[in-house]
C-alpha cells in the first residue's frame, strides 16, 4: 500500500522568524499524522535552517527547483549536489509556475529530473494542464507530452524513486479545485502511462494532487484510489491548516 505524502511548497514566502514558528507548529502536531509522510519545501536560502530545525523528526525537506548542471560557471544556479549537502531529500521539478513564468520547457524539466535523480534525490515531477487546454479537451495529451518527455530522457526505472504531482494549472491559487473524480481520472491516466513501461513501478508510484487543497476538501480527494497525497501551496503556510491536511492523508492510508 502506498503511504500518503503531504508536501508543502512555500513558494516565494518566508522569513527566519516566520519559518521558525511555522515549522515549530508543524512539528508539534506531526505526531498526529504519523501514518503520512510530511515534506517541507522552503526557498533556497532557508533550506539549511529548516533542515536543522526538523533534524531528528520524520519531517523531510525539499527544494523548489534545481540547476541542470552539476557545477561550474552558472551564476545564480543551485546544483543538486548542493541541495543534498544541506539536507534535502526531494526536489520539485517542473512546477507550473516554472513552466509558465520562467519558460521551463518539457526538455528542460527532463534535464532537471535527470540531475536530481543522479544525485540520489527524489524528484517531484509536476504536470498539469491550463484551463484553455482542459476546455479544449486535450488534458490527457498534455499529460502524455509532459510525462513522456521525462520517460524519453531517462527511461522508466528512475520513476521507482520519484513522485509525480498532478496540478491543474487552473486550480492553483484560484480557489478552484478539480473534483475528486476529475483528479482521479488524470491520476489514473498518469499511472497508466508509467504502467505501459513497467507495471510494478506504476503500482508503487505516488501521485500527488496539487490545486487549492485545504483541510475541508483533503479527505474527499485523498480517498480516491490513485491520489496519494497532496502538493500544497498557500495552505502550507498555516501550521493548523497544513496539519489538518496531513491528518486527512493519514486517515485515508
Image (cartoon, rainbow, N blue to C red):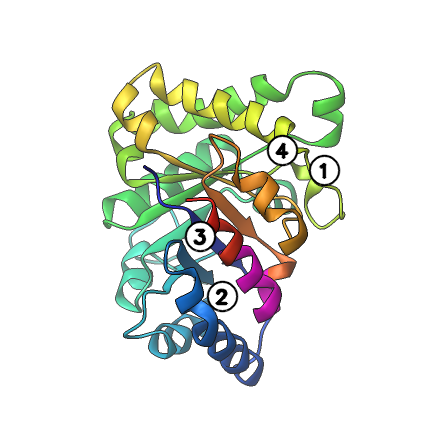
* Residue 217 can be seen, yes or no: yes
Q: Earlier in the sequence, mark 2 or mark 4?
A: 2
> Magenta residues: mostly which secondary structure?
helix
Q: Residue at label 4?
A: 180
The residue lying furthest to the front in this view is 251
Query: In which quadrant will I find the N terminus?
Result: top left
Residue 55 in percent (x, y) is at: 30, 75
Question: Disc 1 on helix, strand or loop?
Answer: helix
Q: Which of marks 1 and 4 is nearer the N terminus?
A: 1
Q: Which of marks 1 and 2 is nearer the N terminus?
A: 2
Nearer to me, 170 or 212: 212
Q: Residues within 10 Å of mark 3 (few under 14, many from 20)?
A: many
Which mark is on residue 250? 3
Q: Residue at x 49, y 36 (%)?
A: 227
Query: In which quadrant will I find the C terminus?
Result: top left
Q: Earlier in the sequence, mark 2 or mark 3?
A: 2
**243 vs 167: above or below:** below
Q: Residue at x 26, y 24 (%)?
A: 200
Residue 188 in percent (x, y) is at: 49, 23
Q: Residues within 10 Å of mark 1 (few under 14, many from 20)?
A: many
Question: Disc 4 on helix, strand or loop?
Answer: helix
Question: Disc 2 on helix, strand or loop?
Answer: loop
Amino acid at each position: 500500500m502506498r503511504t500518503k505524502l503531504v508536501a508543502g511548497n512555500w513558494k516565494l514566502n518566508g522569513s527566519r522568524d516566520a519559518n521558525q514558528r511555522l515549522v515549530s507548529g508543524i512539528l508539534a502536531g506531526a505526531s498526529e499524522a504519523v501514518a503520512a509522510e510530511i515534506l517541507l519545501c522552503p526557498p533556497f536560502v532557508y533550506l539549511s535552517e529548516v533542515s536543522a530545525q526538523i533534524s531528528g523528526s520524520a519531517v523531510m525537506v525539499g527544494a523548489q527547483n534545481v540547476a541542470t548542471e552539476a557545477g561550474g560557471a552558472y551564476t545564480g544556479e543551485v546544483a543538486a549536489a548542493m541541495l543534498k549537502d544541506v539536507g534535502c531529500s526531494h526536489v520539485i521539478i517542473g512546477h507550473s509556475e516554472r513552466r509558465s513564468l520562467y519558460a521551463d520547457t518539457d526538455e528542460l524539466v527532463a534535464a532537471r529530473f535527470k540531475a536530481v535523480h543522479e544525485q540520489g534525490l527524489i524528484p517531484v515531477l509536476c504536470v498539469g494542464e491550463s484551463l484553455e487546454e482542459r476546455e479544449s479537451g486535450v488534458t490527457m495529451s498534455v499529460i502524455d507530452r509532459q510525462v513522456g518527455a521525462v520517460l524519453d530522457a531517462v527511461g522508466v526505472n528512475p520513476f521507482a524513486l520519484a513522485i509525480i504531482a498532478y496540478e491543474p494549472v487552473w486550480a492553483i491559487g484560484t480557489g478552484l479545485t478539480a473534483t475528486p473524480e476529475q483528479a482521479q481520472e488524470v491520476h489514473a491516466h498518469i499511472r497508466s502511462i508509467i504502467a505501459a513501461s513497467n507495471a510494478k513501478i506504476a503500482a508503487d508510484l505516488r501521485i500527488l494532487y496539487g490545486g487549492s487543497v485545504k483541510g475541508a476538501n483533503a479527505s474527499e480527494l485523498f480517498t480516491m484510489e490513485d491520489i496519494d497525497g497532496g502538493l500544497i501551496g498557500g495552505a502550507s503556510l498555516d501550521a493548523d491548516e497544513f496539519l489538518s491536511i496531513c491528518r486527512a492523508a493519514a486517515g485515508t492510508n
